[in-house]
Image (tube, coloured by chain):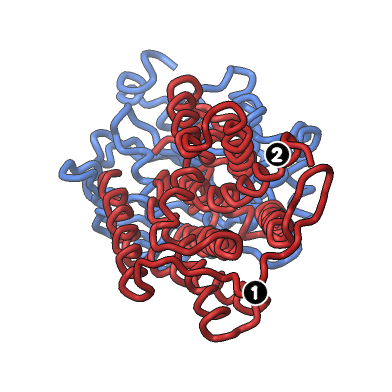
Chain colours: A blue, B red
Amino acid sequence: MLKPSKDIVLKISNLSSWYGKVQILHEVDMHVKKGELVSIIGPNGAGKSTILKNIFGIIKKRKGNIKFLKKEIITMQPEELAKIGIAIVPQGRSVFPSLTVEENLVIGAYTRSDNIKKDLEYVYDKFPVLKERRNQPAKLLSGGEQQMVSMGRSLMVKPKLLLLDEPTLGLSPSMKKLIFDKIIELNKSGLTILMVEQNARMSLKLSDRAYVLELGRNRYVGKGKTLLKDKRIQHLYLGGVA
Amino acid sequence: MSIAAQLIANGLIAGSIYALVALGYTMVYGILKFINFAHGEIFMMGAYIGWTLHVLWGVPLLIAFPVAMICCGAFGYFLEKIAYKPLRNAPVWAPLITAIGVSIFLQSLAILIYGAQVKTFRTGEVAQGLHILGAIITPIQLTIIIVSTVLMVLLWLFVKKTKIGKAMRAVADNREVASTIGINVNKVISVVFVIGSALAAAGGILVGMEQNLTPTMGVSVGIKAFTATIVGGIGSIPGAVLGGLAIGLIENIGIWFIPSGYKDAIAFIILLLMLIFKPTGILGRKKEEDVRG
């Protein structure tokens, strides 16, 4: 696999986080190198999505460091992060339902002032179905198509780091495969991705590295394929033999 | 002149005012899920500022009108920052009670400054009415229809075509996701308050030109515009316009059938029926589309 760089794009150290009085994350450490596809797996309630929400400053009660390209971002507001090149595909139906498909995509480039035509074509090229439906309100699209809109919109940010929060949740098997294929494509074209996935087997297969989280703590870390073969992980998260 | 044509004309005139005021309710609700019950008083303030500039100080109406809109827009900006923003994460009733407080405060302030007696824009003779399609419409009434239509078209273009207008719709759809793509939600909320308040002020002066000014003039228009918002579908901009015109028309055509003393009751009856049978309004969003979190 071609993974040219050792530059660290994202470095999370000693991150703790709370929902009200309940502590969700306990001193979590994590990093993502340039060009990597890294996933976070773990059972429900392990705090996987909480990590992404922390990177995006959606959760305010937290402690620790989150550095993006050596810059501390833990104090930044969500709306400042798009500008420095972090995009997120939030969990669930995260399109703007009353905006058309094209408006959804164009608004992804909200913080940019350069020409976005090429990027729009790039997104339509990746997801041709969106071009066909570009003038329809996004609420009329199927769940999978909405997920494509959401991914396309995040690409319009022109991100240096893409965060995916359960990108295949609630999608049909064929749509899951399509979305996973696109994720690989994007990663191969050089995009650095940090992904949270419920589907542990699939994401371990695809990822360069993975972090296994349990009850808000780092449990295991390693190469995706190594973890996939690890007996303890098979037992805990993969439901038997892989 | 035919009675039907006249009632329809009256309905459209009243309806365009309700629509202007309803737009403020619906835009604020769309984004904050909160009814700004002080909105009717901003309408009243617009009328009084316009009156002060034009009648008291002799400023030409063409200048007094936009200046009053700008003043109320600025007031809306500070109202949100001072009274509502600190309550953004409070229980829903907290900003609601605050809004009622602001509304009482502004009414009292108007009484304090201007006194409780009626003020009027009219100085000279009542103008000769124009005969249009069987109805008699005064030049002022014609102005009401034209100016409010122009303002609504401008708003529509703003929301559809401009970057900040699109951001407004995105924030109304999903505030959290909007912030992740770099939309400054606080800025959008401010813009909504400024525009909504400026439109209410425009409505206030237009009504003030035709009728009289009283410190409580915002109450009944506020309630009817609120009804219009519900009828049209709260959160929907075309819904507010449609609802406003509908309330204006029903109210005015209604007095053909029932004594005109009941005119004000009609809006309440419609509000009740709507809340019972179709709470989402004509163009309102279905509940499932409402955004989580």
Report whether mark 1 lies on the same chain as mark 2.
Answer: yes
Residue at position x 61%, y 38% in the image: B252
Q: Position of residue B47 (x, y in %)?
A: 51, 67
Residue corresponding to mark 2: B8
Mark 2 secondary-structure assignment? helix
**Front residue of B27 and B293:** B27
Marked residue chain, label 2 = B
The residue furthest front is B125
Direction from residue B115 to residue B227 in the image, left or right: right
**Front residue of A178 and B292:** B292
- Mark sitting earlier along the chain (1/2): 2
Quadrant showing the C terminus of chain B: top left
Mark 1 secondary-structure assignment? loop
Marked residue chain, label 1 = B
**Front residue of B231 and A90:** B231
B191 to B289, vertically: above or below: below
Residue at position x 36%, y 69% in the image: B110
B276 to A219, vertically: above or below: above
The amino acid type of the residue labelled 2 equals Ile
Residues at discs 1 and 2 in contact (Cβ within 8 Å): no
The amino acid type of the residue labelled 1 equals Gly
Disc 2 crowd rating (10 Å Cα; few below 14, some 14-19, many 20+) is some
The label number, if any, that marks residue B124 in the structure image: 1
Direction from residue B281 to residue A197 in the image, left or right: left
Direction from residue A25 to residue B263 in the image, left or right: right
Disc 1 crowd rating (10 Å Cα; few below 14, some 14-19, many 20+) is few
Residue at position x 44%, y 34% in the image: B268
